[in-house]
Image (spheres, helix red, strand yellow):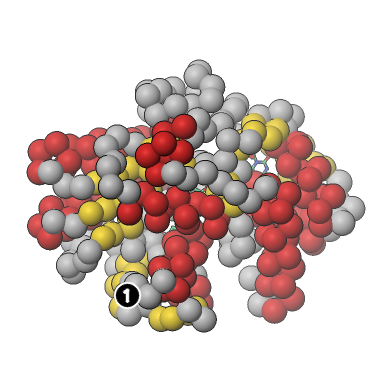
Amino acid sequence: MTGGAGFIGSHLVEKLLSEGHTVDVLDNFYTGTRRYLTFSSGKVSRLLEQDVADPVVGKYDGIFHLACPASPVHYQANPLDTFRTAVWGTWQVLENCRTNHTRVVIASTSEVYGNPLEHPQRESYFGNVNPVGIRSCYDEGKRGGETIAMDFRRVYGVDARIVRIFNTYGPRMLFDDGRVVSNFCHQALLGEPLTVYGDGSQTRSFCFVSDMVEGLVCAMNAKDFDGPVNLGNPLEYRVIELAQMVLKLSGGRSSIEYKPLPPDDPYRRKPDISKARRILGWEPRIPVEEGISKTIEEFRERMECHGD
Ligand code: NAD
Ligand code: UDP
């Protein structure tokens, strides 16, 4: 697994180990955490500490390719590295799969839809992406990753499976990750104001990480898989509603502080998951209130134990 020390990756590694698989992790620890690579369910057999944009060696039954910073704060901090990771990193993984005839699940993103004019977003929608804005390194990088995945499929017959992940949250998100769920939970537990960007009327659809992990495993195991598949929770919330929910569930008394909306921030986002239901037999099961409560609980414990 590339990106196995990251937020989603660490949960996926844990699940695969608990099922008795042997897992190698490739990660450069840009946003990854070393202690997330030790699990009660087992041990990662090999840690390849390297950039995914360097040649990826080793013969595997399957590769989950997740390496890439996902939070706007982190992917915008080094935009050229982000673009290189998303495009050239994916190329390196695909080269490995071509040589070894290996199946690969590639983590793409709802960001390929940009600021969508079609709502909810189906896989057939081509998107509305600014190619020169501050989010482009990620959005266009991931679109480029999808392009080469489909061309490795068409040209070399590589079994490349693109999943478009929508906003996913849960335990183990970094406190300084910068994404909305981790910011709100951390701020609420510290008693600091919750930072709502813009007027909070923009929407997102939030998927709990255990549901996402199930979806990724279904994508690897599915018998038939061709074009991209959306994975996410189709329930849509305004950002201000999320802030109110976090305050209610944490018992916090923080105020809400409105801050400027970052450029190109998509106004709404909600996946159409009919295709995932049809070809993977998958849909999310954890209600958002339950997932947010679990996240707050783990944040509380971590703040008491580690402080990070
Ligand atoms: P994350 O930032 O927590 O994890 C990414 C992991 O990749 C980290 O361990 C990081 O150190 C590693 N990494 C980054 N660049 C690398 C490089 N050049 N070489 C090797 N390792 C590198 O992010 P996440 O939330 O776990 O996301 C995982 C994947 O899912 C990403 O590809 C992301 O684009 C995609 N995704 C996530 C979400 C979400 O809401 N979490 C939404 C859409 C797409
Ligand atoms: N957001 C917010 N406050 C924060 C962080 C994010 O209001 O502290 C907003 C952000 O502007 C966006 C939404 O929450 O509209 C989701 O942001 P996130 O960075 O989690 O993911 P995105 O979907 O934008 O990649």
- The answer to whether residue 209 is seen in the rendering is yes
Residue 260 in the image: above or below residue 290? above
Query: 287 or 91, which lies in front?
Result: 287
- Residue located farthest toward the top when viewing the structure as drawn: 117
Residue 173: x, y in percent?
58, 60
Q: Quadrant of residue 217?
A: bottom left
Residue 65: x, y in percent?
33, 55
**Residue ID at (33%, 63%):** 1
The disc labelled 1 sits on which kind of residue? Thr
Mark 1: few, some, or many residues within 10 Å (few <14, many ≥20)?
some
**Residue ID at (29%, 41%):** 225
Query: 82 or 233, which lies in front?
Result: 233
Q: Is residue 113 left or right of residue 253?
A: left
Disc 1 designates what residue? 22
**Residue ID at (68%, 67%):** 298
Query: 73 or 306, which lies in front?
Result: 306
Q: Within 8 Å: ligand 1 and the Cβ of disc 1?
A: no
Residue 202 in the image: above or below residue 59? above
Q: Quadrant of residue 195?
A: top right
Residue 89: x, y in percent?
27, 53
- The answer to whether residue 144 is seen in the rendering is no
Residue 54 in the image: above or below residue 228? below
Q: Is residue 26 left or right of residue 17?
A: left
